[in-house]
Image (cartoon, grey):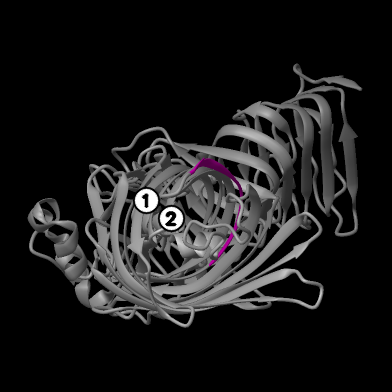
């Protein structure tokens, strides 16, 4: 359709002024000239092409007046495609406009709802940088499906009228962001606040956002969807001069943790009620404690202290954990004062004011910050405990634990030389570790399991004794449950490695045993109450041990063996970045563990009914351990050192035994050991077990 009325007043006109008169016009063609729809309810649809001219819902306001129409109707205009250059004037009645165009940067047309309760709906389109000042005399505006950017140069950018309907009086016009709709205000200047004369309702799956700057609404907010501030300029504000009700919606703000320490803010002048989930997007994550006033309220209003809560209950930023607390009187610190409201703090409410002291924050040690009430995130105690866990797994066992008496004082079971042997053992334990000192005050419970296999060979056999060397391979796994006042976490290491042994068994009862082992670890790290976790952590450990003892026979197959062992272990953990931008580095953890002990052993030998030799022994042991090193340090974000030290002294008792038999040309030995230990200065304790089998030929 092509209508050209450029030389006339109207391209389309309805002169039938009657209450039941309906005029329906739909076009995708080219229309030039004004459209006057006249009396009664009329509808005009522009789905393509172009319309150049004004649309009058009832009468020509440029050339006539309202008395020209006796029966104004509820008119509608639908713009789903094409171009519209001039204006729509709804005039009398409860008129409606629906705009569903896409890919448009603004529009030249103006929309005047006129009298009555008029509605303008943006539906299923995409419009960039439209001007709200082109919309006047409407009572309701909605955004449903699609995304709509409204530009603003400051001042009043969109003004709606209050209205009265069957539900009562509504002092503010209503803006609704409905399902799948996204309305975004994009201020073009940051010097003048943008003002919206209306209320705001965001329904489920609807999103309202401001790009930056300061935006003020005269009416109340009702939030069932998402209200957010884009991180273009952090420090933006969104204000309602009325009340705020959270109806299960979300509010997303931004905070700069370093160096500015500023955030976006929601400001409410009226009552605050309901429930809103707060999402805070951290920028420049830092372990420098900051305090942010995210929601500023009117202390004279009725405020629900539970109206806002953080997603997952807390916000983890680098090494710190923040909570959102309501402060009805604000927060006064030495260098800053925050007004009443909902404040993001790295400490409990009673301690929060200390972190408004910039001088204290920058000069204090991590211990002083913790003593002042600083809250750490749950991964920090895990980082501090991590090396301690790996050192416990890396330490080497005693000869008795490893061998179970595979050789008796250097002599073989038979009168011949000591035999080659292949052997294997499995061991495990449950332990509770309570450090002697710890920055975070952690402790942990550990369960561990180890499989070790080896091949022993005779290097030297002489009248003085035997020299036996061996090659070992091992697998270790475990789980350490770390506990602290900041939350619980878990370390799950898996280790693979190999090693070597060299042992001298003297015929006079003296022995020396040397061990070395290398272990490569991969560990899963997980905090119980946080959704994110870092990638698996890699580490390398090695250990060296030297042990010596002297057996003294006291008759009837009983012997006493005083012994001493010095075991060195070192663990190097690769640096990594945690799940919350927390860079973690480790100094090499080292342990130098000394042991002095005494074992008492009863040995028996006999010949079975088949004439085969049998031997068995049982033993008890008591050990005293002293840790010469043991301090471990984890550095988080390059500035915060978290260190711990284990018990100096630990006592241990245990018992075990072995039994040997022969089948054909092979000789077998089964051995087992149980131990219990306790720390002398802390509450550390542990229980361990070990069983093994060797085959000799």
Residue at x-position 53% and y-position 39%: 150
Residue 568 visible, this orientation: yes
Query: Left or right: where does residue 175 sit relative to residue 433?
Result: right
Image quadrant in which the N terminus is located:
top right
- Provide the residue span drawn in magenta: 448-461
Circle 2 residue: 396
Residue 135: where, in percent of width, then height? 57, 44
Which SS class for mark 2? loop
Q: Nearer the viewer, residue 259 or 298?
A: 259
Q: Residues within 10 Å of mark 1 (few under 14, many from 20)?
A: many
Query: Left or right: where does residue 240 sit relative to residue 198?
Result: left
| 336 lies above or below 56 | below
Q: Nearer the viewer, residue 475 or 621?
A: 621
Q: Nearer the viewer, residue 611 or 208?
A: 611
Q: Are marks 2 and 1 in contact (CB under 8 Å)?
A: yes
Residue 523: where, in percent of width, then height? 53, 51
Residue at x-position 34% and y-position 41%: 284
Residue at x-position 69% and y-position 39%: 60
Circle 1 residue: 545
């Amino acid at each position: 359709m092509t209508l050209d009325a450029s030389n006339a007043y109207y391209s389309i006109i309805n002169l039938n002024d009657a209450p039941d008169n309906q005029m329906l016009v739909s076009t995708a063609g080219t229309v030039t000239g004004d459209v006057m729809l006249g009396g009664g309810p009329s509808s005009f649809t522009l789905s393509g092409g172009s319309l150049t001219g004004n649309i009058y819902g009832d009468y020509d306001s440029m050339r006539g007046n309202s008395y020209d129409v006796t029966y104004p109707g509820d008119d509608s205009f639908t713009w789903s495609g094409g171009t519209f250059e001039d204006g729509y004037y709804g005039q009398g009645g409860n008129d409606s406009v629906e705009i569903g165009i896409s890919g448009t940067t603004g529009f030249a047309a103006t929309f005047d709802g006129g009298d009555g309760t008029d509605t303008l709906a943006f539906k299923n389109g995409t419009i960039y940088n439209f001007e709200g000042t082109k919309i006047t005399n409407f009572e309701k505006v909605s955004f449903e499906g699609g995304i709509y950017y409204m530009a603003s140069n400051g001042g009043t950018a969109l003004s709606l009228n209050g209205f009265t309907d069957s539900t009562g009086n509504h002092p503010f016009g209503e803006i609704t962001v409905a399902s799948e709709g996204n309305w975004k205000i994009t201020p073009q200047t940051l010097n003048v606040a943008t003002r919206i004369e209306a209320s705001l309702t965001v329904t489920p799956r609807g999103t309202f956002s401001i790009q930056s700057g300061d935006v003020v609404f005269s009416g109340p907010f009702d939030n069932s969807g998402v209200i957010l501030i884009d991180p273009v300029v952090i420090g933006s504000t969104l204000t309602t001069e009325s009340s705020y009700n959270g109806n299960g919606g979300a509010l997303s703000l931004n905070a700069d943790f370093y160096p500015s320490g500023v955030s976006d803010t929601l400001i409410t002048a009226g009552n605050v009620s309901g429930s809103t989930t707060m999402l805070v997007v951290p920028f420049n994550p830092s372990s420098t404690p900051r305090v942010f006033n995210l929601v500023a309220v009117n202390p004279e209003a009725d405020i629900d202290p539970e109206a806002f809560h953080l997603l997952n209950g807390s916000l983890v930023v680098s090494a710190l954990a923040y909570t959102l607390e309501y402060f009805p009187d604000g927060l006064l610190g030495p260098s800053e004062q925050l007004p009443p409201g909902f404040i993001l703090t790295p400490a409990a409410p009673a301690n929060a004011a200390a972190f408004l002291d910039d001088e204290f924050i920058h000069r204090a040690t991590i211990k002083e910050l913790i003593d002042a009430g600083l809250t750490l995130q749950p991964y920090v105690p895990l980082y501090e405990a991590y090396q301690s866990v790996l050192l416990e797994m890396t330490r080497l066992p005693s000869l008795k634990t490893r061998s179970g008496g595979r050789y008796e004082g250097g002599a073989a079971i038979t009168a011949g030389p000591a035999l080659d042997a292949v052997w294997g053992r499995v061991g495990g334990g449950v332990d509770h570790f309570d450090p002697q000192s710890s920055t975070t005050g952690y402790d942990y419970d550990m369960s561990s399991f180890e499989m070790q296999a080896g091949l022993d060979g005779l290097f030297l056999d002489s009248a003085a004794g035997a020299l036996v060397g061996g090659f070992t391979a091992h697998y270790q796994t475990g789980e350490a449950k770390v506990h602290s006042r900041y939350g619980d976490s878990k370390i799950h290491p898996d280790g693979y490695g190999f090693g070597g042994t060299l042992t001298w068994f003297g015929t006079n009862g003296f022995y020396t045993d040397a061990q070395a082992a290398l272990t490569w670890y991969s560990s899963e790290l997980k905090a119980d109450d946080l959704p994110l976790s870092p990638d698996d952590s890699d580490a390398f450990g090695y250990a060296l041990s030297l042990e010596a003892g002297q057996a003294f026979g006291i008759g009837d197959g009983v012997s006493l063996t005083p012994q001493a062992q010095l075991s060195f272990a070192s663990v190097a953990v690769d640096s990594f970045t945690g799940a919350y931008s927390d860079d973690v580095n480790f100094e090499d953890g080292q342990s130098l563990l000394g042991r002095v002990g005494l074992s008492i052993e009863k040995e028996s030998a006999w010949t079975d009914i088949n004439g085969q030799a049998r031997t068995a022994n049982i033993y008890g042991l008591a050990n005293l351990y002293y840790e010469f090193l043991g301090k471990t340090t984890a550095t988080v974000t390059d500035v915060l050192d978290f260190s711990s030290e284990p018990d100096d002294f630990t006592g241990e008792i245990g018992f075990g035994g072995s039994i040997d038999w022969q089948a054909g040309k092979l000789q077998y030995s089964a051995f087992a050991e149980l131990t219990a230990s306790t720390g002398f200065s802390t509450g550390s304790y542990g229980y361990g077990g070990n069983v093994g089998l060797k085959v000799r030929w």
